[in-house]
Amino acid sequence: MGFADDHLIPLVDEGLGNSAYLLDLGDGRALAMDASRDLRALRAAAERRGLRIAFAADTHLHADFLSGAVQLGHDTGATILASAAGRRAFGHQGLADGDEVDLGGLALRALATPGHTDEHLSFLLLDGGRELGVFTGGSLIVNSAARTDLLGADRTEELARAQYRSLKRLTELPDETAVWPTHGAGSFCSAPPGTKRTSTIGAQKQANPLLAAPDEDSFVDRLIASLGTYPAYFDRLGEINRRGPAVLTAQPALPDLSAQQVRALMADGGHVVDVRPAADYAAGHIPGSLSIPLRGQFATWLGWLLPDTAPLAFVTGADQDLGEIVWQAYKIGYERLASRLAGGMDAWIADGNPKATTAFLTADRAAGRPYVDVRQEAEFAAGHVPGAVHLELGSLTAAAGDAPTGPVVACGHGERAMTAASLLERAGRTDIAVLDGGPADYAATHGQQLAQGTEGTRP
């Protein structure tokens, strides 16, 4: 068929930091690569081009989202392509190293590239004998390689050594071969910050610091040293993807509940998640609710901070998209979505229920309070307020007692800090304020220079 650049459509999930790909095969059919269960963008792209998804491929058993391959197989009859070594418990075409799939003019060759997971495959796209590009999933990613600790600390080094060999294999491809990774900037699968999500083999040989490591031991040391924390739900999704996510036969809905019904849900062990902007939550919220503003990172923090086994109710603003709440939750396996509070906070207050407030302070009003920074370690090390106490948001539930008295809690802008404040309030703290801004705002207001590194900052 011949291949043109516009035959490949990247579909970026900015919140999770991942890319899926829709490949137009030129005959009305398409291949979906590493599609998530939230298929809205992929389906819209396919519809615009009049394409039917004929193949759905997964490079590995994903830990950060539920695969959409099973759903595509059900909805469009797509042939699911995945590693035979993954022992998936649903119908698929199992592939081993070197196996090729005829796509009708183009071909897809499986390359075993273990490291991020045991059964990881990269998929080399061929036009006759010419290597067009390689879907590298979580092996070679732009200026890095994906994390190797998801199968347990006892296997991290072993998988890092496998990752070294996989990257060396990929760099044997021609320099002009395009590199199409799944994980990118913003992914907790160990992608570095940056805006580029695709590259070429040649460019990565020049720019990827891991590929500059002089030997395998150095590579392993560099990769393992880069590993930060990751969301708790990552430990669950690989097995769900192996079994196959449940097929959805209808659009998931979020029904309305009254204030009285929301109170009953909380009394029965359910959780209330307030998805309004941080400032709205600060002005008035249900006591005991958790603030997770609805934005790209909503799924990450929902999956990090709450169990998937309890019913969830949501407090929303007037113009917020209920479908966005549902799909962000469903793509990480959170399906016990009981309701949203009908009428929002106005209805809650009108029913005679109490509301709580949280101080949301500009930098000039936060002077004199201990400064608690809840960002990730790499962000903190890159620049923080001198003397700040560092408590990552993901570990704050267990570390609530380590927060000093009367703190101002801060992140980069205020959203994660409001989430942190809501966690501390759930733990019984009533002395919390949140910084409306970030460390640069605070330092500039108080005539400080940001500090770097992590020494002397933990409680």
Image: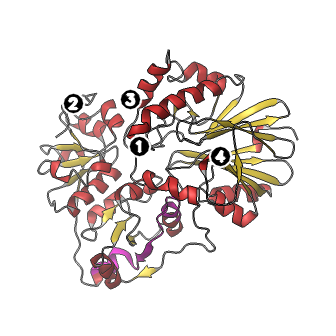
Separation (CA) of disc 3 from disc 1: 16 Å
Rounded to the nearest angstrom, the CA distance separating label 2 from label 4 is 53 Å
Residue 383 image offset from top left, x and y in percent: 30, 31
* Kind of residue indicated by mark 3: Ala
Query: Which sits in the foreground, 44 or 160?
Result: 160
Amino acid residing under circle 1? Gly
Residue at 34% x, 46% y is 413
Residue sitting at 18 percent across and 48 percent down? 365
Quadrant in which residue 459 is drawn: top left
Q: Secondary structure at mark 3?
A: helix
| Mark with earlier residue (3, 1) | 1
Q: CA distance from mark 4 to mark 1?
A: 21 Å
Stretch in magenta: 327-349
- Residue 196 located left or right of residue 388: right
- Cβ–Cβ under 8 Å for marks 4 and 3: no
Residue 424 in sight: yes
- Which one is nearer the viewer's eye here, 296 or 395? 395
Q: Which mark is residue 225?
A: 3
The image quadrant of residue 75 is bottom right
> Which residue is labeled 2 in the image?
448
Q: Kindly identify which residue carries mark 4.
A: 83
The residue wearing badge 1 is 152
Which quadrant would the N terminus be assigned to in this image? top right
In the displayed structure, would residue 162 be above or below residue 202? below
Residue placed at 40% from the left, 59% from the top? 302
Q: Which mark is residue 436?
A: none
User: In x, y percent, where is residue 30?
Assistant: 77, 52
- Observer-side mark, 1 or 2, equals 1
Choose between 89 and 434: the one closer to the eye. Answer: 89
